[in-house]
């Protein structure tokens, strides 16, 4: 990527810095279950640039191997990625594990189980945040999540008031509907700048969404350069999810 590709983002960050303001960035990476080569690459990248990463872990399929690995990754935290990442929507509907297709009590019990399973495995590394698979959840369930121990919900897109604090992601590095590879870095930088302008007058964050298991070299290259250009920029700070939860 050229300086011109980065300019929308870096110019905006320069403006924040000149105004004495610091934008809160955070990184959410979905679908971790166990240590893999792509996960190692992500953790190395995060450690090298001191960029904290919140791993949305699928409770049903994870265990001691991931917990053991993350014990040696101080920049990594864990959030609850549904229970099993199964789709319960009928064919033709958008995929959902946490939609209205099953009784609410059944869905909520699975989420409570996921939270306690990850708390046992990860202890204080777990941020009590629900990341619904496919970023979708029946809105009627959200106000009941606090009673299970969740402190925040994280989906994709603008935050909505659904009855629990929202700490969303806003920029997705992957072109899911097209190439299923990394999106052009210039587009991503421009989108990040748009989000920065949207939160310039408020308290919001900029959440970047990644999926380490499917990253191509375009994504890895983008992240490396993004962290090089932002990790020490005075206009932003990559923040731990637990800190955003407060
Ligand atoms: Zn997922």
Image (spheres, helix red, strand yellow):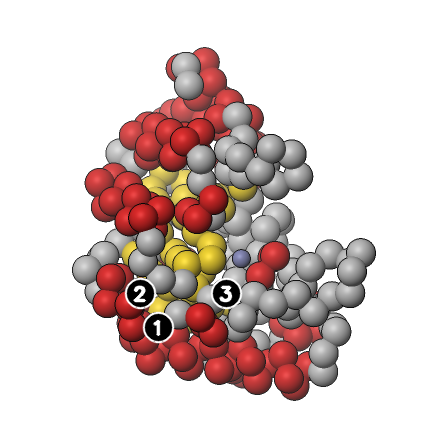
User: Which label sits in the foreground, 1 or 3?
Assistant: 1
Residue visible at 60% across and 33% down in the picture: 179
Snapshot quadrant of residue 33: bottom left
User: Which label sits in the foreground, 2 or 3?
Assistant: 2
Give the spatial CA distance, label 1 vs label 3: 14 Å
- Read off the residue under disc 2: 66
Question: How far across and down, in percent of the image, does residue 95 sit?
Answer: 69, 59
Name of the residue lying farthest toward the right: 92
Snapshot quadrant of residue 54: bottom left
Please, is residue 215 above or below residue 95 in the view?
above
Disc 3 within 8 angstroms of ligand 1 (CB): yes
Q: Which mark is residue 23?
A: none
Residue visible at 31% across and 48% down in the picture: 37
Q: Nearer the viewer, residue 64 or 186?
A: 64
Q: What element does badge 2 sit on? A: helix
- Read off the residue under disc 1: 63
Question: How far across and down, in percent of the image, does residue 88 sit?
Answer: 70, 69
Instruction: Mark 1 or mark 3: name the one nearer the start of the chain.
Output: 1
- Read off the residue under disc 3: 81
């Amino acid at each position: 990527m050229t300086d011109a590709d980065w300019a929308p983002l870096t110019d905006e960050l320069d403006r924040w810095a000149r105004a004495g303001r610091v934008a809160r960035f955070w990184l959410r990476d979905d679908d971790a279950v166990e240590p893999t080569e792509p996960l190692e690459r992500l953790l190395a990248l995060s450690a090298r640039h001191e960029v904290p990463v919140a791993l949305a872990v699928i409770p049903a399929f994870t265990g001691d191997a991931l917990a053991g690995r993350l014990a040696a990754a101080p920049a990594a935290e864990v959030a609850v990625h549904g229970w099993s990442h199964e789709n319960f929507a009928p064919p033709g509907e958008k995929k959902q594990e946490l939609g209205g297709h099953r009784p609410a009590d059944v869905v909520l019990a699975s989420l409570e189980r996921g939270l306690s399973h990850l708390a046992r495995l990860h202890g204080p590394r777990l941020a009590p945040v629900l990341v619904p698979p496919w970023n979708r959840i029946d809105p009627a369930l959200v106000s009941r999540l606090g009673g299970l121990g969740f402190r925040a919900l994280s989906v994709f897109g603008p935050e909505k008031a659904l009855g629990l604090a929202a700490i969303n992601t806003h920029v997705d590095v992957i072109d899911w509907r097209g190439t299923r590879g990394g999106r052009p870095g210039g587009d991503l930088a421009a989108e990040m700048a748009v989000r920065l302008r949207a939160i310039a007058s408020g308290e919001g964050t900029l959440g970047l969404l990644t999926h380490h298991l499917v990253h191509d070299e375009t994504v890895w290259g983008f992240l490396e350069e993004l962290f090089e250009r932002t990790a020490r920029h005075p206009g932003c700070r990559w923040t731990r999810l637990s800190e955003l939860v407060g």
